[in-house]
Amino acid sequence: MRDFLVAGNWKMNGNSTANAELVAGIVAGVPEGSGFSLLVCPPFPYLASVVAQAQGSAVKVGAQNVSEHESGAFTGEVAPGMLGDIGCDYVIVGHSERRAMYGETSAQVAAKFQAAQAAGITPILCVGETLAEREAGTTEMVIDEQLDAVLGTAGVDAFATAVIAYEPVWAIGTGMTATPEQAQDVHAHIRGRLAEQSAGIAAGVQILYGGSMKGENAAGLLTQRDIDGGLIGGASLKAEDFLAIANAAAQAK
Ligand code: 13P
């Protein structure tokens, strides 16, 4: 019913030469079949060249962040319209690294989500709890606050053209993956939260898992009922590793 989306968040890694090699490797190795799409999210300076290189292939391109403003005196920021202008299809909003290190609030993330959609870019809304929050038993409360900020401003219908990524902060870059059951529980909770407002939207929205996902654990996660793909950091920086996850998605369909 829902297609898989396998997305690479390159974070602040790469250079022109390495990126060209990585994209060439991914494009050459896109698995046969249907029911999934691939996305790469390079740093801003490389977006246009990656868009050009991926053109005509099955690989889409997204950004890692965006301004909530349309244009104007916002030194150092990138407007949603600019992303659309150079051929980006997606943007990640509310990644935990931006929430934790750059003080992005849920309200600001909601504004970015809406600004992206207004420019025709599909937002990938990241939500997730820290280890302390999980141990305190507040995982669902934390996720609800992050989700509700967007539901409250953009409305549930906005999720017809959005993606959600559940990224437990304790699993990001740590090698500690959530078990398929732990991830499935939270994915089901997220879908349920949307279903309280619209069963149809909830049934259609892609919910990706992120946090130390790799070839070896991808199949276990992707065969869970409510997991519709991955948002991959470390394992998206080598074509072979990224394609191992893409292959798991192609086979899980
Ligand atoms: P890792 O796959 O490196 O844990 O990163 C996950 C992530 O933060 C993707 O956005």
Image (tube, grey):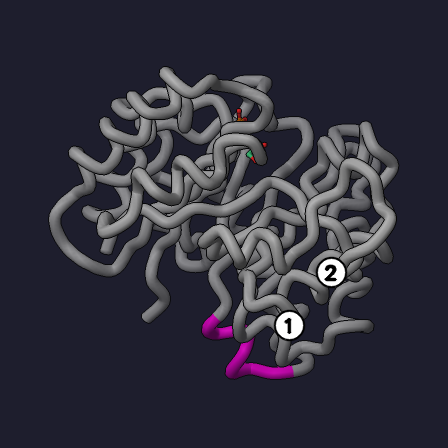
**Badge 1 local density, few (<14 within 10 Å), some, or many (20+)?**
many
Looking at the image, do the residues carrying marks 1 and 2 touch, with CB atoms under 8 Å apart? yes
- Would residue 173 be seen by someone viewing this image from the given angle? yes
Query: What SS does tag 1 mark?
Result: helix
Image position, residue 152 (x, y; %): 81, 72
Three-letter code, disc 2: Leu
How many numbered markers are drawn? 2
- For disc 2, the marked residue is 147
Residue drawn at x 83%, y 33% as measured from the top left: 102
Q: Is residue 84 left or right of residue 245?
A: right
- Quarter of the figure with residue 147: bottom right
Cα distance between the residues tagged 1 and 2: 9 Å
Residue 194: which disc? 1
Three-letter code, disc 1: Leu
**Badge 2 local density, few (<14 within 10 Å), some, or many (20+)?**
many
Pick the front one: 80 or 207: 80
Residue drawn at x 67%, y 27% as measured from the top left: 170
Query: What SS does tag 2 mark?
Result: helix
Pick the front one: 180 or 122: 122
203 magenta-colored: yes
Which quadrant: the C terminus? bottom left
The magenta region covers 198-204
Image position, residue 162 (x, y; %): 56, 64
Pick the front one: 165 or 67: 67
**What secondary structure do most residues of the magenta stretch adopt?**
helix
Residue drawn at x 67%, y 79% as measured from the top left: 196
